[in-house]
Amino acid sequence: MKKIFKIEVDCAICAQKCEDAIKKVEGVTGCQINFMTQKMTLEADDIDDVMKNVLKAAHKVEPDFEIVE
């Protein structure tokens, strides 16, 4: 399953670091963060199950990272 989220991240380097960290989360099959559009495309078998760990991984490298609902 693939889902697009609106995010807030402060810089392109932070976005890349968050993307790399999220890709390592168990259950995530793909992640792409576009800093210019402030959007994240997340691929996982069950997105709801991995979201807590996705946020945790992103916050480890960038505490200001947010997913806007």
Image (cartoon, grey):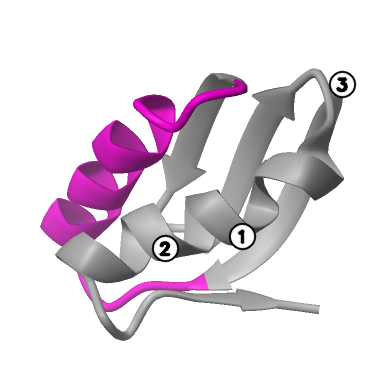
Specify whether residue 21 is painted magenta.
yes
Nearer to us in this view, 38 or 27 = 27
Q: Amino acid at mark 3?
A: Met
Q: Position of residue 66 (x, y in %)?
A: 51, 78
User: At label 2, which amino acid type do we have?
Assistant: Lys
State yes or no: discs 1 and 3 in contact (Cβ < 8 Å). no
Mark 2 Cα shell of 10 Å, populated few (<14), some (14-19), many (≥20): some
Which residue does the numbered mark 1 point to in the structure image? 52
In what element is the residue under mark 3?
Answer: loop
The amino acid at mark 1 is Lys
Considering the image in quadrants, where does the N terminus appear? top right
Relative to 52, is 11 above or below?
below
- Confirm whether residue 37 shows in the render: no
Q: Which residue is mark 3?
A: 1
Tell whether label 3 touches label 2 (CB within 8 Å).
no
Disc 2 or disc 3, which is closer to the eye?
2
- What is the C-alpha distance between the residues marked 2 and 3? 20 Å
Q: Secondary structure at mark 1?
A: helix
Residue at left offset 12%, top offset 54%: 13
Which of disc 3 and disc 1 is earlier in sequence?
3
Q: How many marks?
A: 3
Residue 48 lies in the magenta-colored region: no
Q: Are marks 1 and 2 in contact (CB under 8 Å)?
A: yes
Position of residue 34 in the picture relative to residue 52 (left or right): left
Q: Which mark is residue 56?
A: 2
Disc 1 packing (10 Å; few <14; some 14–19; many ≥20): few
**Residues rendered magenta in the picture:** 8-27
